[in-house]
Image (spheres, rainbow, N blue to C red):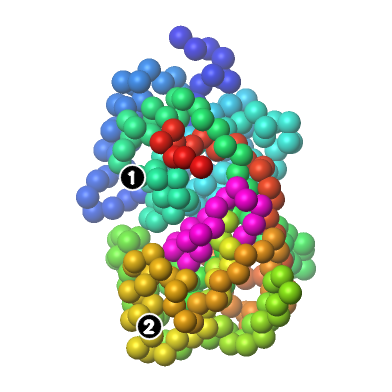
Amino acid sequence: MVKDVTERWGIVYCPKGDMLVSPAKRWTKIERCLKEQGVVYDYVQSENVGSVERLVKMMINNGYRTIVIIGGDSALNDTVNCLMQADREVREQIALAVIPNGLMNDFAHFWNIKEGEYSKIIEWIRQRRIRKIDLGCIRYTNKRGEACHRYFLNCINVGFIAAIMNLRRKTHHFFGSRTLSFVFSFLLLLFQRMEYKMSIKLNSDVIKRKVMTVCVGNSLGYGQTPNAVPYNGMLDVSVVYHPEVMQLFEGIYLFLRGKFLNHKSVHPYRTREVLFENTQNAMVGIDGRLMNTPKGPFRITVEQEVINLIIPTWKSF
């Protein structure tokens, strides 16, 4: 029996309620796979959104060297922000792994990690193939005038997509399903002429015009930055001007085919830094979750090779 906590996995289970499988049944399946492969672990379950950071901090302070998040993009966001608060020497000894269990699981999809393949995922976590990855970072001033920052794995959304996140949050309890509330929110807002007068600086370009939505991606960005990779020290940016009604259908078609950047209203960039000087108070989303809207200008940068991520053995680079 492994007694040293550094050799045990620290698992945080973030339940996802849906109409097909209860959280308890899903955990039972995962637990069975863990036991079949002889994994020694300690397990905690998050009670709400705010509890993930508290539980991850507890695991860091208790000396766990392998932290496994069974959750989605938002839970991973909480986790990496906890890791970035730790001393660098401590963080260097910790490896992060994910078993996807969220609404979108976009960051997991980048690594070809699929929902439900528990035995396969646990097997490669045991092999502990580690890759150092980048994080994006948004630096802003909050409503109290305090300088703040927050890291992200996947993307920052400003404008339309962030508004969808906000409406999804308000309709989640009505539908009883995060997936249904997301679809409803998207369809409801799709044909509204949501435009924001923005001023954006990136590379040598200055964009001053009405914009529908902006995505700054360290990874796939929910299909908006499909060429972004979290290990090249760069951020991909897609700026979307408001298309005409007929172009919306073309945009949806290209998006579903993975060719979002081919749409005439989409303008892609690659950079190390983006400065939003004005967004007309557009909503801001981070890794699939709405954040408090920054007060005034805000800057987005990239931090290179700061997190140890356990990646699949079948993924080549």
Give how far apart the Cα atoms at labels 1 and 2 are.
30 Å
Vertical position of residue 5 compared to residue 55: above or below: above
* Residue at (58, 26) in percent of width and height: 64
Tell me the kind of residue under disc 2: Leu
Task: From the viewer's side, name the closer residue of 28 and 212.
Answer: 212
**Residue 29 horizontal/vertical position (percent):** 28, 33
Residue interval drawn in magenta: 219-235
Q: Where residue 186 sits in the image (x, y, percent)?
A: 37, 74
Type of secondary structure dominating the magenta stretch:
loop
Seen at 46% across and 25% down, the residue is 127
* Image point (50%, 77%), residue name: 266
* Residue 220 visible to the viewer: yes
Residue 220 is covered by the magenta coloring: yes
Check disc 1: other Cα within 10 Å, few if <14, some if 14-19, many if 20+: some
91, above or below 297, in the image: above
The residue that disc 1 covers is 115
Magenta segment includes 246: no
Question: Which is more toward the observer, 20 or 191?
Answer: 191
Q: Is residue 71 left or right of residue 94?
A: left
Could you tell me which secondary element the residue under label 2 belongs to?
helix
